[in-house]
Amino acid sequence: MNDDFLCIAIDALGGDNGPATVVKGAVTGVNENPSVKIYLCGNEEKLNEELSLYDYDKNRIVVTNATEEITTHEHPVEAVRTKKDSSMVVALKLVKDGICKAFISSGSTGAILAGGQFVVGRAKGVKRTPLAHMLPTSKEPSLLLDCGANVDVKPEVLVQFAKMGSIYMENVVGKKNPTVAIVNIGTEEEKGNALVKATIPLLKEAKDINFIGCIESREIPNGKADVVVAEGFVGNTIIKLYEGLSKMLLKEIKGAMMSSFSSKIGAVLIKKSLKNTLSRFNARNAGGAPLLGLKGLVVKIHGNSKEDEVISAIKQCIEFIDKDVSGKIIEGLSQEIEAENDDIQN
Amino acid sequence: MNDDFLCIAIDALGGDNGPATVVKGAVTGVNENPSVKIYLCGNEEKLNEELSLYDYDKNRIVVTNATEEITTHEHPVEAVRTKKDSSMVVALKLVKDGICKAFISSGSTGAILAGGQFVVGRAKGVKRTPLAHMLPTSKEPSLLLDCGANVDVKPEVLVQFAKMGSIYMENVVGKKNPTVAIVNIGTEEEKGNALVKATIPLLKEAKDINFIGCIESREIPNGKADVVVAEGFVGNTIIKLYEGLSKMLLKEIKGAMMSSFSSKIGAVLIKKSLKNTLSRFNARNAGGAPLLGLKGLVVKIHGNSKEDEVISAIKQCIEFIDKDVSGKIIEGLSQEIEAENDDIQN
C-alpha cells in the first residue's frame, strides 16, 4: 500500500552524471529514511542494472520505465508536450496522478518549469509558481524567489511569492516567523521601479508575513532577510551572479595559492580551515530549488548533481510533505481570496 | 588662461574621509599630470590649510569656496535644488559654466545623479544618462551600465546606453571595437522579459556597436563582454551584489585563515600572491563611475575613497576630455537621430 509510504518520483535522466549517480542517491535516501518510497523513472534495464549493485528494501524503490529523454538543448515547452514517454514527463505524471507527492530532477530547468505547470498544474488560488533557491550567506541561508520562472509579473504576484516563501522557510527549513524583504535599489521606500513601489504597500498590509522592508542586493550575502522576494528577471540575475562570482573568485584565490612555492605550502596549511568555511557556501548542501505553488512539490537539482544533492533533495521533500506545505500554501492563499471577496462585497 | 589647461572640478566634501584625502589626491593628480588644473570646492580656509602641507604648482589648484554640504541622508533632488552653495553644486556649476570639463565627487550618489542632470544638463540627443561602473573580471574589466540612474526605460534608451558605453570603452579605456552584450535570463533570444525581447532586434540593427548577444549574469565575472548593458534596476542589483558578495566571501576566507595556528602561518605564506590577485579585483584601481551623456563628464567615486581613487579618477577625466568622448557621444547619437528622421521622410 502506497498510503503507508511517502512517495517521491525521481527523473533518473537529464543530469550530467547519468542514472548511476541518481540511483546511488535514491538507494541512500531510502536506506536513511524508512518512510520513503521512490519511483525511479528512466530506462528500466539500465536502472535495474545499477540497482543490483546495492542492498536496499526492494519494496521501496520502484522502477518506472521511460523510453525518451528531454535534453537541455530542446525547446522546453515543446519537449514536455511531445515527449510523453520521457523520464521527466513520466515522473511528473506520477505526481499529477496522486501516486507521488514530490518530484526531483536534475534535467533542463526550462522543461521542469514547463512540466511543473502543464503536467502537475498550479494549486488553487496560485497566480504564478515561483522557483526558489536557498542562498548561502554569512549567517543562515536565505530563500530567494522568484529565480526566473516568471517575468513581468504584477505586484499581487510578488505578494503571493512572499507568502509561499514564508510558509516554505517556516515549515521546511524550520525558521520561525521568517523575515521577508523585497529587493530594491535603495532601502528607502520612495526608491525603486514602478513594480516595487506598487508592491511595498501590499507587502506591508499582508497578514501572515513578517515584512521588514527593502533589501539592497549588497546585503543579501549578509543574510539580512530569511525570504528575499524579487521579480523573476531580477531573481534570476541574482542567483546566477551569486554562482558565477563565487566560482570565479574562488578560482582566482586557488590560482594565487598555486602561484609560488611558498604559497603552495601556505595553501596546505590553510586547506582544512578553508574547506570548513567553503562547505557552508556550497549550494549542494542546501537542497534543491523548489518550484512552489503546484499541486505537488517539484524540485530542481543542479545538472551536475552528485548523490549528496539527491539525498538532501529527498530530505527536503520529506519535510515538505510531512508538514503539508502544499496544503498550507493553498490555505494561506485562500484566506487572501476570501479577503478580496469581502472587499468586493463591502 | 584656462584654455591651456584641462580643468576638473572636485567636490572636496561629501566623502567619508573628509577633505584631507581629496586634497592629497588632487595635489598628486596635478603633480603627475602637467596639463591638469583642479578647482577644489569646499570650505576655503580648511582647504587652504590642507594645501599648505604640500608642494605643487599654485597656478594649477584653485580653491572655490562653498559654505554648505550635501550629505547622504538628504533627499537628493531636494538637496541639489536648495543647497545652491554646497560644495557639490558649486563644483557642478563650474562644469555648467564651461570653466571645467569634468567633475569628481565622493558624495551622495543620488545627489550626483540629480545634480548631473539638473545642473550640468543632458547633451543633445541623449534620452537618459546612465551610470556606468567598471567591473573587475577574470579577464579585462567590463563596463556595466546602467547601474541605477534610471528605471523602467524604453528599448531605444538601452540602445543609446550600448552606444555610449562602447564609445567610452573605446576612447577612455582603449578597448578597440568593444563587444556589447545585454543581460538576460538565458542566452537564447526567445528568453527574457518584454523589455529585453524588444531591445535585442534594435541592438542587432544598431550601427557602430559590436553586439554579441545576450549574457547571463553568471558569465559577467568571466569577462565575456566589454560592455554589459542592463536596465537600471537590474544593473544596480548586479553592481551591489558584486560588491557585497566579494566583500563577504573575502571576509569569510580571511576568517578561515585566522582560525588556527597553522592556518595563520599558511596565511603569511600566501599573502603576497593573494594580494596581487585581489588587487585586480579592487574597484578602486578601475577609476570612478561616470554618468554618461551629460554636457560634461560627471564621475562618482566611492564614499570611502582614498587618494588613490581620486588620482585614478583624475586620469580617467583626462582620457575622457583628451579623446573628446562627450563630442563623440553627441556625434554618435546625432547619426541615430538623422537616421530616424530619414526613416520618417521615406
Image (tube, coloured by chain):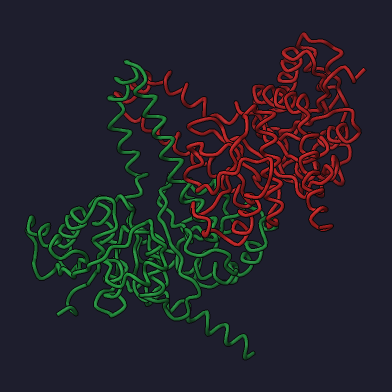
Chain colours: A red, B green
Along the viewing direction, whichever of B84 and B126 lies nearer the viewer: B84
Give residue B251's position: percent from left, percent from top: 39, 33
Visible in this render: residue A240?
no
Give residue B268's position: percent from left, percent from top: 27, 25
Q: Name the quarter where the C terminus of chain B is drawn.
A: bottom right
Give residue A229's position: percent from left, percent from top: 62, 46
Q: Residue at x 66, y 50 (%)?
A: A205
Q: Is residue B325 left or right of residue A297?
A: left
Q: How many marks?
A: 0
Q: Residue at x 60, y 62 (%)?
A: A194
Up-down: is A92 above or below B113?
Answer: above
Q: Residue at x 38, y 56 (%)?
A: B73
Quadrant of the rendered image containing residue B301: bottom left
Visible in this render: residue A27?
yes
Quadrant of the rendered image containing residue A290: top right
Along the viewing direction, whichever of A184 and B227 lies nearer the viewer: A184
Along the viewing direction, whichever of B166 and B92 lies nearer the viewer: B92
Q: Name the quarter where the N terminus of chain B is drawn.
A: bottom left
Q: Is residue A166 left or right of residue A135?
A: right
Q: Is residue B227 left or right of residue A266?
A: right
